[in-house]
Image (tube, rainbow, N blue to C red):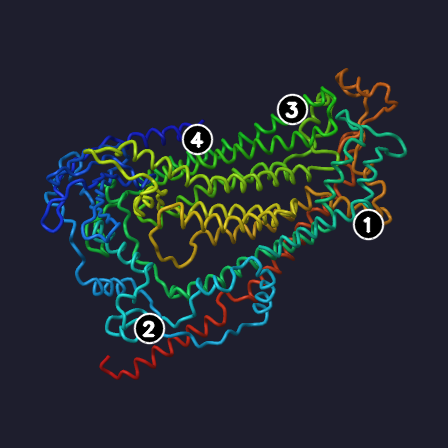
Amino acid sequence: MNALSLAVAACLAMATYAEMQNVTVKGVAVCDKKVLHNVLVELYEKDTMNPDDLLAHIHTNANGEFQLYGEHDEAGYIRPYLRVRHNCHAKPNCARIAEYQIPQSALGDVYDMTFLTLDIKVAGETELLEKQAKLMLVKLPVRISDVEEKDSILPQFLQRFLKIFRFFDFNAETKAQLEDPPYFRAPYSAKRRKQFLLGKHPEQLFPNAERCRMVYDLLMRARYDAAQTSIVGILAIFFGLVTMAGDPVSSEICEGKINHKKAYLCDQKSLKSGCDYAKLSYLFDNWSTVIFSVCMSLWATLFLEGWKRYHSAVAHRWGLMDFVCEEKTIRPDFLYRIKTRRYNPITQKEEPYLSVKKKTVNILASGATVLFFIFLVVAFVFGMIVYRVLVRGLLMSTGDSQYGFVLVSVTAATINMVVIVLMSSLYNKLAHRLTVWECPRTQHDFDNQYTFKVFLFQFVNYYSSLFYIAFFKFEPRPDAKSGLSFMLETCNSTGCFMELVIQLAIIMCGKQFISAIMETLGPKIAKEIRKRRLARKGKKTDGDVLSEEKSELRWESDYYLKPVTDQFLFEEYLEMVLQFGFVTLFVAAFPLAPLFALLNNILEIRLDAYKFVAQVQRPLPALAKNIGIWLPILDKISKLSVTINALVIAFTSEFIPRAYYYFTHDKTLKGYVDFSLSNYTIKNMPAEEDRKFFQGKNVTTCSYRGYYNDQLEHNEDWWHILAFRLLFVVIFEHLVYLLKLIIAYLIPDVPAKIVIQQQREKYLARQALIAQGPNV
């Protein structure tokens, strides 16, 4: 109740921040000292959740005049700006877009822009870019690298092994267009312009991406101041398929007899009814499971080490190896909302300051909301338990029990997957709202807080049901009061492993399928909604009719595309991290997970390429030294996967009990089914309807899963198996962790080629300075 109260208080506090705000903007559009009529003028508000929130629009009249009024409710201050589409000094069949920031002082008043001159050009463009390049430490190519590709033995072996899977790569012609030759780079200096490769052509000196980044930085400052693992998984499944016919355990279950007598289970089923389920369980739970789990744990380390090396190569190619993050600029929203100020000894100015008390209150209220939704996810898991109990009881009452267990597991997993997807979409928006409400000071703090909230929730959202089935779904022992109801939410006679496989397969594959559909159709639907909304609001103004689709200009069609937000890459990172969790955390239960992940990633590469090229507006380029907080998250998942897979093998699969029985019973598995089941006297069942099923069956006891004696206490074998399970977890963890440390130590994060190239860059730069003499 306390968490719920705090969550409600947080929502109410957020609501109190929102208030309706308005602004009126007027002026006259001018080009070459002449007024422009029929120019489209739009008033937007840059909202955190929607970067392009259209407030009003109009076309200039015959005198070039315009006046717009817009209002919007927002927590904090709205950030209005004017967007003008015109053809002043534009090329034929082209148009220009100009944007003008509306000052905060104009809110609630009339902002008179008087003459809006649209023919202004930037003077001294090259000099301005050179100044920005020096300020932002932009590195440009000086000469082509002459360093030979050499590396140590293990990385060379890894690279040769990865070349086997080049059929997923681009062809030679495409790669030649995409890949630049390796360059020696140096920080740009206007005094040494001619020493750079394109120094004689200033108009080509800075790439387009760098130009966009430098101009955006200038405006901001002025305004605010696994393919190999899939093969191993297929081999593990193939091993189970080949050896299934010779498995004595599933053969005994399919025979349906214990000690040459027909056996019945206490949940009113014959032992033989679990035949198909036992064969499917063996397909995934066999002797190869341990080997496959070790391979996947080591692959996780190889993946991260390979990523670090690839990242180093890309960072060096783009001149980011020595990149130092720029000073942490205060977020505009922080400047607008925070009114308390404090002296900053670094800048020696009064700056906005959020007190510790206010920050603590915000974090506590936000944290209470996060905990409430996490508990809500856990409640849904318990809801699925209730669903399984009710449906399984209904199937038992109708006599359909042979495939009822699989049917219940599949339907419950499907419903759970749908709930997960819906909760995921809802919580992402809520987490963004909470982070905005907390009002972090810098964008770095904002991204970290937002990422932590979303990943924490998504981890519980996607993996909680898997943890429940793997580790918390135990078989309760019968007593004089329970009757048969205790059997409704228990594992099958062959264990919970197959149910874990079904749950993992449906959640993982279902999420990938839904994500692919949303990435394909989402931008198209957003484009149509955006286009229809603009057409409905501004199709006819002053007698003007917008162009039809077949006669649209390029900038018009681009404008209809879905706009990108500040966190436009967040969903891509989150999707890959969650997939990495599916492939590593519970991969012992589903060896085909790497195969489905590989197929999804092949499709995902093409979908993302099409989306970013043709379906969304072009994002602003920005430099980053690495992938930020996501790399530590991947590393933690990689380490956690070792422990979880060890626990899955030890406590969820039948590997340890079978191994114990094999080595203590003349190295054979015959009789294992009788060994793994305990007997319960039928006449001790309290309910008459429970005993009625066994009448006429010529049996006095029924079997249930577990290691119990006649006094319904754990027998000696249970304690021995528990000891071996714990011993296996310790040995597995220490062995795999040791191998992971050895691999991480032997494979350097930076390839030797890059290290040599960096050292040669410094050597050549030093020689160039010496050759120029002491006057440099």
Tag 2 residue: 197
**Which circle, 4 or 3, is nearer the viewer?**
3
Q: Amino acid at mark 2?
A: Leu
Q: Earlier in the sequence, mark 2 or mark 4?
A: 4
Element under disc 4: helix
Circle 4 residue: 3
Q: Which residue is mark 3?
A: 391
The image shows residue 589, relative to residue 17, as above or below, that is below
Alpha-carbon span between mark 1 and mark 2: 72 Å
How packed is label 1: few (under 14 Cα within 10 Å), some, or many (20 or more)? few
Residue at the (87%, 49%) spot, across then down: 666
In the rendered image, the vertical position of residue 372 relative to residue 208, given as above or below: above
Secondary structure type for disc 3: helix
Q: Residue at x 13, y 36 (%)?
A: 110
| C-alpha distance separating marks 4 and 1 | 52 Å
Earlier in the chain: of badge 4 and badge 1, it is 4
Distance in Å between CA atoms under marks 2 and 3 = 72 Å
**Quadrant of the rendered structure where residue 114 is?**
top left
